[in-house]
Image (cartoon, coloured by chain):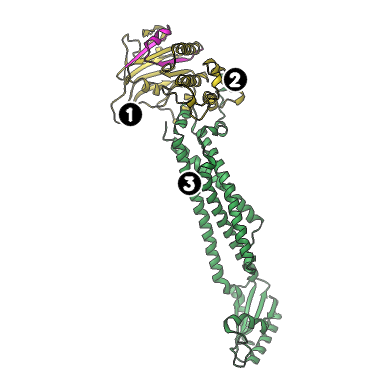
Chain colours: A yellow, B green
Amino acid sequence: MSGLEGSIVQFDNVGLRYGTEREVLSDVSFTLYPGSFYFLTGASGAGKTSLLKLLYLAQRPSRGMIRMFGSDVITLPRKALPAFRRRIGTVFQDFRLVPHLSAFDNVALPLRVSCVAESDIVKPVADMLDWVGLGHRADARPATLSGGEQQRVAIARAVIARPEILVADEPTGNVDADMALKLLRLFEALNRLGTTIMVATHDVHLLKKVPDSLIMRLDKGRLADPTGALRYPPRRPTHIGGVRG
Amino acid sequence: MALNEVIRRNQPRFGAERSGLLQQARLAGPMPWVIAIMVALTVMAAAAGLALSNVASSASRAISGGLTVQVIEAQPAERDRQAEVAVALLRNRNDVAEVRRVPDAELDRLIEPWLGEEAGTADEAIPIPALLDVRLRGPVTESKLEELRAALTASVPAAAVDAQSSWLGPVFHAIHSLQWLAIGLVMLLAGTSAAAVWLAARSALGSNRDTIEIVHLLGGTDRQIARIFQRSIAVDALIGGVVGLLLGLIAIFLLGSQFAALGSGMVAGGALGVVDWATIGAVPLIGVAIAMFTARLTVLGALRRML
């Protein structure tokens, strides 16, 4: 198992079904290493969002094993999950901003959940809003923001607490090319600081923007692995033969 | 301290400080008003129960050592003689604190509403027993009654001795029944308030489900989320409690002034004391505590069904 040492996420033969429906994910096995940048691609309905839900602990798998941060999260007691979730930043496909909170309060939410003192919140949140170009809209409610602005708020909220893993579901879907590139640079900056990044996207052009990224492709709920690099047990990222962006 | 270190601290004060996370209607919503009505009714029921308790205690104290001796004799002269003997006998006893023969004029006034004027004084008058109002130094027990009866029988054969409390027994039973009714009402109202809070908490959970899910996914704990609801419900309950207390107090003062106008000694014994007012003042606070506890249980129960 030496190949798994230092892994941050490990999926082993994971399957997921909702109710009695057929499996939306089948036999998914892969390992993510700290500080790596992954793209998750696949057609609509391939299971990208379901896989991300497992990653940000919104769902438990129907079968298989998932280890995160060195712990088996399937057998983890429910009350231990929040501490794990605080180590994961998530950009939801539908943003999931709290509608009656301002952009500032939405971005501040992860810090407040983590009990950061108000005096330690104001500057980082203001800086983050400035960084995503929304410093002037700090007091705006989500309903008054455009789709692109909402997405930037969602991204700011996901990264404000410097998570160890950032999971983003189509994070550039509603922004223009310039902003998409800027957001990718933000992800790369976080990645350089050691955050493991997993971005689900349809946008093939995006894959080429991050040269050091690794690509995982889902096809009908199964992880396509043409190079064999993601097969369990996988090798360390520097040797992963995943398709380079 | 680096931000990453700061966010690892684990003092979950989030809920207490961030109740703004929930969309709240406050006075525009039904919750404070439902609680206001419940508290007003509880305050009135509690006041009634406490007043009845005071009436019972005061009347019980007043008659606890009292007994009545009737000299039931048709011949007025013999009745008077036996009454005098009874008074003399009783006054010589150490366990008797006070003996008073009720004057005929007072007796006439007592029976006048039922038998008409001069019922006991006219020639063909109905013979009215002579009444002795006796106050003992200790409580009137069954053995004490027997002892007095035995002492009087030889010299006053027409004497009938009764404890005054036995006359008022049915009244005390009625008062105790009303007290239990008031306690039952208070319990029912507390239960109804808890049910109303349960419904409100479930409704708030439903309408804030998306927000709760987001907070959950961002790492919020059940306790943090429950605390947000607790605080929100507590504010509603406090607003409703204060309004309900005011409404209840107005009702108590209005009813109190009506009863005070009766001028009855028994009713006067029902006046509320400092402890009673403190108990009534605690009703909204108890209401807030019940509301917070119910909200916490409801929310934690609902959250447990989420991952």
Which chain does the residue under circle 2 lie in?
A
How far is the residue under mark 2 from the one under mark 3?
Answer: 42 Å
Chain identifier of the residue bearing label 3 in the image: B
Mark 1: which amino acid?
Tyr
Q: Chain of mark 1?
A: A
Whether B83 is drawn above or below A63: the answer is: below
Asked whether the viewer can see residue A203, the reply is: yes
Tell me whether the residue at label 3 lies in contact with that at label 1, contact meaning CB atoms closer than 8 angstroms: no
What residue would you read off at disc 3? B196
Q: Is residue B142 placed above or below B19 in the rendered structure?
A: below
- Residue at 44%, 37% (x, y): give it: B206
Q: Mark 2 near mark 1, Cβ–Cβ under 8 Å?
A: no
| Closer mark to the observer between disc 2 and disc 1 | 2
Residue B238 coordinates in the image, percent (x, y): 58, 44
Q: Look at the numbered disc 2 and give the secondary structure of its residue.
A: helix
Q: Is residue A95 left or right of residue A47?
A: right
Does residue B307 lie above or below A123 as drawn?
Answer: below
Please give the label number shown on residue A18.
Answer: 1
Residues beneath discs 2 and 3 located on the same chain: no
In terms of image quadrants, where is residue B6? top right
Q: Which amino acid lies under the numbered mark 3 shown in the image of this protein?
A: Ala
Q: Is residue A216 magenta?
A: yes
Regarding mark 3 in the picture, which secondary structure is present there? helix
Q: What is the C-alpha distance between the residues marked 3 and 1?
A: 35 Å
User: In the rendered structure, does residue B13 fall within the stretch colored magenta?
Assistant: no
Assign a secondary structure to mark 1.
loop
